[in-house]
């Protein structure tokens, strides 16, 4: 028996369908995710002008509503998805006033004529970020649809419902299937009620179902499938599912979702890929060469608009590459490669060649990037190094040592060079402070670059005080929301596994 709250939600969904104007889909587009989980991020204005505009990237997806990022996008004519983090869902579900305040502060004021000169082309609001992820258990289930409804009501009241759509990015573990048989797919049983409510909401408002696809993780988990199948190679063994033949992992993943939507009663719902990419470090088969092969084939496949066996000549409406830049503070629960999914390095330098809209030209790099001084912190080989490994582990707990992972670009460094890598990573992330190269007297400053072959000992970017405090606007807004409703912020665990 459904609760009264759920009955109200369904009634709202039925009524809203009558009131919502029909939308239209533009041709298949390729955009990028722009995450900011970096200790020393590039200035937002440099990202917009130097990377997005210079490479003719016309769509970008954000994970929050960072004011500095949104202001930098004003007047850029770039289509934008603004994100709402999972830790805000409870408050937005419980308070229409909080939802209205969020829309006013993070959407209305940035639109043309909203106060920011030139305005931001906000097309979507992403309510939550993979809130159904299995590792989250059911902590966000009660809030997702209610938060989406309240944000929609706020858009209606602001007369923006016909301009800005609501989406809910979902991880691919929302459905279960045999990887070789898309026809076996179905939404997880524990999601039945919530998923029906969400699909009803999306259908009523003509929003696409957004699926995040992680081909690299799937490749790691399925040893029976060759890497060629994930890289769209013609040499890959084709998989048969009844009368349908699958030549690549992407098509089988999309049709697994199509099958799940059909079984749930929403067979015609449009699909958007919210994340898809391939890493360049942090694991075996995570290299720039393999990533280039994947990305070039992906973009070509999308451009051809061939669709899938279940949806021939009906491709996904939009695809967002993950990610624009490497992020040295991303959560690495699923793997150390998570911090190396950028098309560009942390300092805005292209890792490989792919057409993101710039055509036959090479990708334009960020220009006039400001770095800290040309100094590195390495281990002092003239000291007793019996405790050096312990110091390196402590350093990596507060730095990024994922390149030292098995198969990573620095995995073959050996001891004690890997100790130096750990020391330098800590030293750079802590702004080259003198005390950051102490390590109980084991650290030594040098002006000689210790990089070896593909293993780069990076120098951190010079960032302003305001840029370094990028997370504060979100904390500030959470404080505002809490004035409407008391709720606990969900803190993500930082996990790092480095072996010395």
Image (cartoon, rainbow, N blue to C red):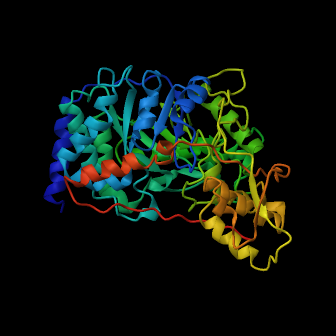
Q: Is residue 6 above or below residue 473?
A: below
Q: Residue furthest front?
A: 434
Residue, x 28% and y 53% (percent of image)? 479
In front of the other: 132 or 469: 469
Residue 263 at least partly seen: no
Q: Residue furthest bottom?
A: 386
Q: Is residue 98 left or right of residue 405?
A: left
Q: Is residue 158 left or right of residue 233?
A: left
In front of the other: 479 or 80: 479
Q: Is residue 139 above or below residue 305?
A: below
Residue, x 45% and y 62% (percent of image)? 492
Q: Quadrant of residue 41?
A: top right
Q: Is residue 254 left or right of residue 452?
A: left
Q: Position of residue 256 (x, y in %)?
A: 51, 47
Which image quarter is the N terminus in?
Answer: bottom left
Residue, x 34% and y 63% (percent of image)? 139
Q: Position of residue 472 (x, y in %)?
A: 40, 49
In front of the other: 209 or 402: 402
Q: Quadrant of residue 322?
A: top right
Q: Position of residue 384 (x, y in %)?
A: 82, 78
Which image quarter is the C terminus in?
Answer: bottom right
Residue, x 56% and y 65% (percent of image)? 495
């Amino acid at each position: 028996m459904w609760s009264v709250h759920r009955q109200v939600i369904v009634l709202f969904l039925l009524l809203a369908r009558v009131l919502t104007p029909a939308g239209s889909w533009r041709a298949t587009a390729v955009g990028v995710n722009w995450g900011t989980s970096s200790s020393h991020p590039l200035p937002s204005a440099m990202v917009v002008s130097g990377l997005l505009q210079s490479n003719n990237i016309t769509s970008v997806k954000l994970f929050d509503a960072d004011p500095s990022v949104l202001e930098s996008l004003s007047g850029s004519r770039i289509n934008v998805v603004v994100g709402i983090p999972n830790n805000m869902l409870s408050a937005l579900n419980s308070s229409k006033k909080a939802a209205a305040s969020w829309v006013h502060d993070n959407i209305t004021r940035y639109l043309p004529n909203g106060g920011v000169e030139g305005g931001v082309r906000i097309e979507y609001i992403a309510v939550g970020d993979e809130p159904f992820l299995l590792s989250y258990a059911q902590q966000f289930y009660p809030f997702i649809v209610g938060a989406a409804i309240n944000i929609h009501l706020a858009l209606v009241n602001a007369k923006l419902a016909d301009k800005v759509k609501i989406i809910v990015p979902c991880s691919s573990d929302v459905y279960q299937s045999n990887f070789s048989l898309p026809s076996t797919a179905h939404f997880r049983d524990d999601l039945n009620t919530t998923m029906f409510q969400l699909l009803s909401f999306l259908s009523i408002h003509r929003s696409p179902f957004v699926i995040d696809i992680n081909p690299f993780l799937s490749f790691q988990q399925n040893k029976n499938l060759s890497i060629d199948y994930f890289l769209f190679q013609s040499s890959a063994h084709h998989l048969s599912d009844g009368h349908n033949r699958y030549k690549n992992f992407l098509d089988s993943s999309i049709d697994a979702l199509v099958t799940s939507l059909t079984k749930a009663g929403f067979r015609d719902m449009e699909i958007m890929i919210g994340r898809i990419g391939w890493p360049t470090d942090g694991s075996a088969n995570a290299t720039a060469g393999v990533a280039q092969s994947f990305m070039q084939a992906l973009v070509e496949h999308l451009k051809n608009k061939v669709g899938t066996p279940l949806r021939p000549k009906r491709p996904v409406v939009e695809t967002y590459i993950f990610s624009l830049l490497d992020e040295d503070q991303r959560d690495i629960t699923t793997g150390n490669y998570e911090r190396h999914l950028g098309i560009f390095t942390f300092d805005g330098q292209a890792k490989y060649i792919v057409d993101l809209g710039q055509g036959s030209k090479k990708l334009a790099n960020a220009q006039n990037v400001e770095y800290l001084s040309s100094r590195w912190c390495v281990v002092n080989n003239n000291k007793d190094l019996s405790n050096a490994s312990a110091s390196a582990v402590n350093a990596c707990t507060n730095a990024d040592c994922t390149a030292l992972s098995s198969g990573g670009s620095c995995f073959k460094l050996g001891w004690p060079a890997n100790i130096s890598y750990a020391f330098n990573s800590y030293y750079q992330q802590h702004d080259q402070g003198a005390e950051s190269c102490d390590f109980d007297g084991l650290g030594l400053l040098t002006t000689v670059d210790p990089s070896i072959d593909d293993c780069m000992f990076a120098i951190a970017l010079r960032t302003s005080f305001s840029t370094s405090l990028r997370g504060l606007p979100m904390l500030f807004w959470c404080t505002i929301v809490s004035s409407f409703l008391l709720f606990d912020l969900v803190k993500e665990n930082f996990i790092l596994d480095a072996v010395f």
